[in-house]
Amino acid sequence: MPARADRMTTIDELNQRSQGCLPAHLGLVVTRCDADGVHIQMAVTPPLMAPNGYLHAGAILTLADTCAGYGCMSRLPEGATGFTTLELKSNHLATALEGTVACVARPVHAGRTTQVWDATVTHLESGRTLALFRCTQLVLYPRG
C-alpha cells in the first residue's frame, strides 16, 4: 500500500523495502524519516570503492537517490501509486576512504504531479560535505 501525505512512512517500512534490492546490497540504512526529511547512512567498505581507491561516485549517487526516493515515497499524495525519477543531478565535492557517509534529503516541492528533493551527502566522522544532489520525480497514478 503506498504511503499517503497524511501518513509518514516508518523507518522499519523503508528498511524492509530495501531488502533484496540495491540499497540493502550497498548497506544503506534509513535512520530517520519525519517532517524534516529522510536520513540514510552507509558504511564505507571495500566493495564500494572505485578502482582508483576512492569511494565510487555511483555509491554516493545511489545513497542520495535512494534518500530522495524514500522521501517521495513517504509523501505520495492520495491516490498515487508510486513515482519515477525524471531528472537527477549531483555535484561531487570530496570523497571518503573510510568511516560512514550520511545523506539527508529534504523536499523542495511536494506537489500532486511532481516532487523535487535536495540531498546533501556528508562524511559522518569529519562533517565534510561530499556531494550535493537534486532529484525531480513524477508522481504516478492508475491509468483510467
Image: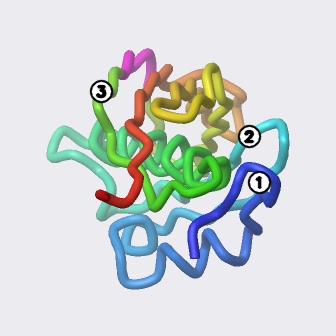
Say which element carries label 1.
Answer: strand
Identify residue type, mark 3: Glu
5 or 33: nearer the eye? 5
Return the residue found at the far left: 51
Identify residue type, mark 1: Cys
Identify residue type, mark 2: Gly
Structural distance between the alpha carbons of marks 1 and 2: 6 Å
Looking at the image, residue 123 sits to the left or right of residue 144; the answer is right
- Residue 88 part of the magenta segment: no
Return the residue found at the far front: 144
The chief SS type of the magenta part is strand
Q: Label 1: how many residues lie within 10 Å, few (<14), some (14-19) or many (20+)?
A: many
Looking at the image, residue 142 sits to the left or right of residue 72; the answer is left
The residue under the point 69% across, 46% down is 38
The residue under the point 55% across, 28% down is 117
Report the span colored magenta: 90-94
Identify the mark nearer the N-term, 2 or 3.
2
- Residue to which mark 2 is pinned: 37
- Residue to which mark 3 is pinned: 87
Residue 52 placement (x, y as % from top left) = 18, 38
- Residue to which mark 1 is pinned: 33
Say which element carries label 2.
Answer: strand
- Residue 92 part of the magenta segment: yes
Structural distance between the alpha carbons of marks 1 and 3: 23 Å
The residue under the point 61% across, 22% down is 109
Marker disc for residue 135? none
Marks 1 and 2: CB-CB under 8 Å? Answer: yes
- Image quarter of the C terminus: bottom left
